[in-house]
Each structure stands twice: as structure tokens, then as C-alpha cells.
Image: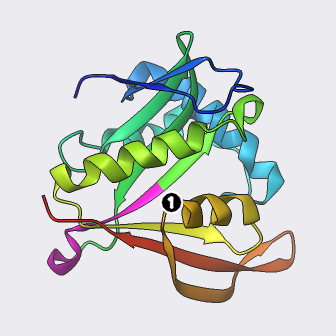
Amino acid sequence: MNAVTLKNRRPETAAGELRIRNALESDLPKIIDIYNATVPTRMVTAELEATTVEARLPWFREHSPGQYPFWVAESDGQVIGWLDFKRFIPRCAYRGTAEISVYVDEKFRRQGVACCLLEHAIAHAPSLGITALVGLIFGHNEPSLRLFEHLDFQHWGLLPRIARLDEIERDLVIMGRHLPAH
């Protein structure tokens, strides 16, 4: 896949222009930095401790640009966000459904980066044979819930008090969106 350049819609965006491209193994240190910055917030990931590049290398290598891609958003040659597709459930009937995750460097949040990555995923998913996207979002992560709702994802489910973060039970909201078949 060729890189795609997207102009930001918000003038206050620090990243003047975003380029979305396939992630490279050399991007992994920055991807892990972005991910690890979310761990202590207890808003985005169920991981309770930071991870390492070495620990996440097998996870990164599982992605295939032809079925379950991993994309980064970059500005001025710097990775500022990422989005990956994962197999939803490993049974044949769910082959057309993918779980997506999106993370943005804390210096670039609320500037449209996650929205551009998600729009890119929505636009390209049908060509990958994906007809439904699912996001698993903590119920207290209101900014992410609003973003997914803004992009026409709907509440498909709720798993109440399923996660324990620092002794606080948290809900998991399943957000989903059907896409046209390619």
C-alpha cells in the first residue's frame, strides 16, 4: 500500500500534515513509547505495566498488510500515532470482522490524528475483506467513545465491571460499525 497523505481539518493541529503508511519494524520503539504512555492513565489499555519492544515484536509481526494491517500516522517524519487491525475471534464465520485499536502520542491528542487513522481504516477495510469493525473501549474513556460515535460506530455491547484497574472495576463497551462489502 502506498502512503496516503491527509490534510488536517483543524488549524490548531501541531502536525501540519499527516501521512498514513504501513508500520515498519523500525517504528516499533516509537509505537511502544506511545502505547506505554497510556498505561498509567488507566483509560485506554488493560495492561497494568509498560511493555518492551522485544516483548511486542511477535505481536507486531502477526500483522499482515493484506488482511490485518498496522498503520502509523507520521508528521515531519515522526510517528505520532498508530492503528492496528486484529482478528476479532479466530473462527471462520468471523473472518470479515476485525478489532481495531488506535493510539496517539500524548502531544498530538485532540488534533484529529485518531480520527484520520480511523477514517483511513473505515475507507480501506472493505478492500481487505473486512465488513465489520469492532472497538473495545473502557466505559470511562469518554473521548474515545465520542470519537467512535462521531464516525458512526454504534454501541453493540457492554461487559460490565469486567476489568479491574487499581482495584476499580471498569466496564468495557463494544463499539461496532458495519461496512459495505467490497
- Residue at (31, 48) in percent of width and height: 123
Q: Position of residue 172 (x, y in %)?
A: 63, 78
- Residue at (36, 57) in percent of width and height: 86
Q: Is residue 136 above or below residue 2?
A: below
State the residue in front, 63 or 155: 155
- Residue at (46, 48) in percent of width and height: 118
State the residue in front, 37 or 56: 37
Q: How many marks?
A: 1
Q: Position of residue 58 (x, y in %)?
A: 38, 42
Residues shaded magenta: 91-100
Residue projecting furthest to the top: 76
Residue position for label 1:
151
Q: Is residue 49 shown to the viewer in this render?
A: yes
State the residue in front, 23 or 142: 142
- Residue at (56, 28) in percent of width and height: 8
Disc 1 on helix, strand or loop? loop
Q: Position of residue 41 (x, y in %)?
A: 82, 53
Residue 97: within the magenta?
Answer: yes
Q: Position of residue 164 (x, y in %)?
A: 76, 76
Q: Is residue 165 above or below residue 161?
A: above
Residue type of the residue flagged with mark 1 = Leu
